[in-house]
Image (cartoon, helix red, strand yellow):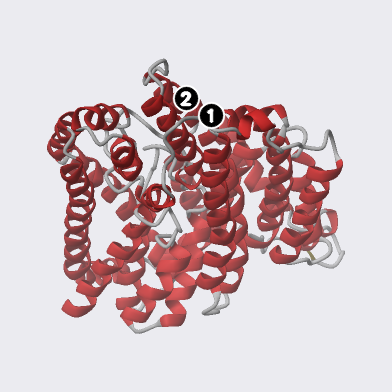
Amino acid sequence: MLIQALLLSLVYLLARTDMINGYMFVGKPIVLGPIVGLICGDLTQGIIIGATLELAFMGVMNIGISVSMDVSIATIVGGGLAILTGQDAAVALTIAVPVGILFNMLKTFVRVFMQYWIMKMQKACDEGNYRTVEIYHWFLWWGYSIVMCILVFVSIYAGTNVVQSVVDFIPQWIYTGLKVGTSILPALGFAMLMNMIWTKEVGAFYFIGFVLTSYLGMNNTGVAILGGCLAIIAFFFFGEKPDMMADDDEMSERGTKKLSKKALMGVYLRAHTLEASFNYQNYQGSGYCYSMIPALRELYPDKNDLAKALRRHYEFFNTTPQVSTLIFGISCAMEEEISSREDMDPASVNAVKAALMGPLAGIGDSLFQGTFRVIAAGVAAELGLQGNIMAPFVFLILYNVPHFAARWWLMWKSYALGSKFVNKIYKSNVMDKLTLSFGILGMMVIGAMTSSMVSVSTPLVIQLGTMEPLPLQQLFNEILPGLLPLTITWITAWLLKKQVSMLKIMMGMFVIGIVCSVLGIL
């Protein structure tokens, strides 16, 4: 047990690498579940638990600091304790929800405590000590990670007997009700994503995805492929054709100083660690400063000039990490001009960063959190629920191929065109067309998953007079297959629009599951 608790705490260290690998999402339940199962001696159950928790926590997204729970720790502790005590995914979820919420609160206290080193890091910027900035950047990642790993270890090592006692105490009718609540919980995630992506232009595609799965039996992968084809058609054949070719004057030399390929590659690679030193003072600002060091060192050999450059990039910054390289490329191009031209205002680079980070976050979150992640998780979870070991690999490949392609292209394209890159994009209406295309794809996949992954039915039977008993579920299926999942998802979406908290809805689903199970309704 001691060795297993220690290994499971190290799994959280793996999950934390998302902060330094550009958010590959290795900390998602679909990836961590199989690892937890392997350590605890039941790989298949780990895969199933990972897929179940992935669907349950589909709507939990890292947007700024607005995260309701730590899904990585929830998966490790909830899944680990459930498997070690011989329980299934329903018990894992029952443990995971409060654990995830508790640890999210503990993380806040740990980050507040670490503000002391953030101030030290700021002082190093003011003095131009870039080496100290680099040390503190990694110290904060390691320090935070080790503290949280210790807490995970204690939770698992001390919690097995407690969990077993609680499970033995729970009556069967509550356990059955929890399983019903678990089966409808994915509706919460789909409702959150639907509210995030829905527009009048793409809303109809939700129902297309739902109908393809409900009536024609098409799986999530098939719907995603068809949605991708429709997205491509919408991008290239509707509206004005985007023109991303740069004008001659835009490709002309911007200044006398030019960054070396080595320095630019250094910025690109360091940008993957943007959130390693995330804090409540300047959010990603410390990580941004660290990432820019290779370029700033090359452009500003004088220590005083370097200190000023470090300080201006230490300012508040917050955007979607997966598309942050667009701003890094522009910053590098602008720093070339600032270092070469006296008439160039150094504050202009911060103005551009401030102007871009909000809109870019909105687009990035929609594409990567709301579209690519959902598609990858939906396809992988379908495999995971069957105990298929390929589930985590499918998720990582489907998500990270477009992720890293976007990172690479945005870095070098934005650097080549400089600060005019964004204007070029908006003038060519690429952003609008991308938003429409990925909205089509995302809505179709969410519609399909509503039908296939919100598992709820009723055993009620209607009998009038001498007629043969008619199962109510059969009647629903004749009206519209998947009517109950669709209804639950839309009611959930309506509650979210009414500002009902996610936690209240989640608890309500469990209560409804228990009550309806006892009454024989679900």
Q: Residue at x 28, y 38 (%)?
A: 286
Residue 147 in the figure: left or right of residue 476: left
Q: Residue furthest front?
A: 256
Pick whichever, 177 or 421, lies toward us: 421
Pick whichever, 288 or 292, lies toward us: 292
Does label 1 or label 2 sit earlier along the sequence?
2
Tag 1, which secondary structure?
A: loop
Camera-nearest label, 1 or 2: 1
Q: The C terminus lies in which quarter of the figure?
A: bottom right
Give residue 344's position: percent from left, percent from top.
42, 18
Pick whichever, 338 or 42, lies toward us: 338
Tag 2, which secondary structure?
A: helix
Q: Are marks 1 and 2 in contact (CB under 8 Å)?
A: yes
Label 1, residues with CA under 10 Å away: few <14, some 14-19, many ≥20: many
Residue 26 in the figure: left or right of residue 430: left
Give residue 210's position: percent from left, percent from top.
75, 54
Residue 188 seen: no
Give residue 160's position: percent from left, percent from top.
23, 71
Q: Residue at x 69, y 41 (%)?
A: 434
Residue 8 in the figure: left or right of residue 117: right
Q: Residue furthest bottom?
A: 41
The residue to which callout 2 is attached is 352
Label 2, residues with CA under 10 Å away: few <14, some 14-19, many ≥20: some
Q: Is residue 497 above or below residue 506?
A: above
Q: Say what amino acid the circle numbered 2 marks.
A: Val
Q: Is residue 11 above or below residue 20?
A: below
Q: Say what amino acid the circle numbered 1 marks.
A: Ser
Q: The N terminus lies in which quarter of the figure?
A: bottom left
The residue to which callout 1 is attached is 419
Label 1 – label 2 distance at C-alpha: 8 Å
